[in-house]
Image (tube, rainbow, N blue to C red):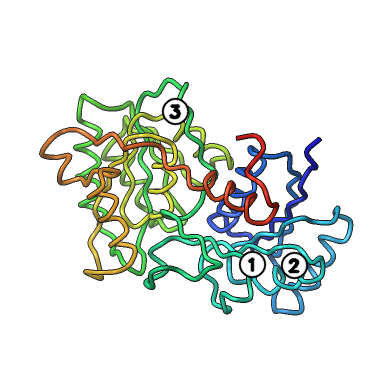
Amino acid sequence: MTPILSIWVLGDGKPGHENQALGLAEALQRLRPCSIERISLAGFRGLFGRFCGALRASAALPKPDLLMAAGHATHPALLWLANQHRVPGIVLMRPSLPLSWFDLCIAPAHDFRQTPAPANVLTTAGALNRVLADSAAERSGGLILVGGPSAIHHWDADGLLDSLARICGDDSGGPWSLTDSRRTPPRFLERLRQRLPGLRVFPHGETPADWLPARLAAAADVWVTEDSVSMVYEALSSGARVGLLPLPRSKSQSRVLRGLAQLVDAGWLTPYERWCQTGKLTTPPAPLQEASRCAAFVLTKFFGCPPPLL
């Protein structure tokens, strides 16, 4: 009988970070029997406080076989617990601490300019997530994911409203639903409801944790504002056709923008300008299932054999 792996997932309370680590843990669970224990460091401040929080939260847990975490606040506790229990520690996203301190770093390829990446780095197409593609699902309608101002993008509510009015008025798609993010300016949804009263709006603060994965799995078409890179990769993981909504850029070049351009060139994404010309979203080559690929790699690397349930 295949032994059950005990996985500890350290979180900092930020959904985007925790979804990456949980995406990998749940992918491992789909390949091999695993128990997943969550250790939250949210609310603990300072190095000593987080160590104490991690110690108290893990005291009654079964001994781990594997630890993983995302977010800078979790890194020292991850290293300490991995050393205490003598098990591998995996960090998601490129850490600020030296890479050599971690057994494995799983991070987007655009975080590493050097080729090849260091030996203990597994690069991915975007951030990992918890979204699964369901090939048997009946897809219909569309979903719009809206971000907000970022280090690379300015906000243009008028331009975005005009784009959304054109998309929602097109007879080939819909019915349309929309959700925002924590970066979306607070008055935008009010303006959106006035401009497009037929659009179903679901504020992110009022949706449960499983709402977005379920909607992505059911949608035929998804539009994402280009500032929201994590939501772009979630949409691609679902297997839907994905369009990219433009926002004004404060930088002409960045590693994130280069990554999006590569996805467009490879046929994964359709820019809004191209959709305006063709009226069609490109069907991606395949669902992007990076969490599953990384899980198979982890099982082989740390447990000595290919995933038994593949």
Q: Which residue does the image show at 22% across and 61% down from the upper left?
A: 248
3D distance between C-alphas at marks 2 and 3: 39 Å
Q: Which residue does the image show at 77% across and 68% down from the upper left?
A: 81
Q: Which mark is residue 307?
A: none
Q: Which mark is residue 103?
A: 1
Question: What crowding class fits label 1: few (fewer than 14 Cα within 10 Å), some (14-19), or many (20 or more)?
Answer: some
Q: Compared with residue 52, is residue 11 higher up or lower down, i.e. above or below?
A: above
Residue 74 shown left or right of residue 182 in the figure: right
Q: Which mark is residue 218?
A: 3
Tell me the mark number nearer the camera, choosing from 3 and 1: 1
- Residue 211 location in percent, x, y? 53, 37
Identify residue type, mark 3: Ala
Q: Compared with residue 126, is residue 135 higher up or lower down, i.e. above or below?
A: above
Q: Which of the two residues, 307 or 105, is positioned nearer the viewer here?
A: 307
- Residue 246 location in percent, x, y? 24, 53
The residue beneath circle 2 is 82
Contact between labelled residues 1 and 2, with CB atoms less than 8 Å apart:
yes
Residue 62 shown left or right of residue 283 in the figure: right
Of mark 2 and mark 3, the one earlier in the sequence is 2
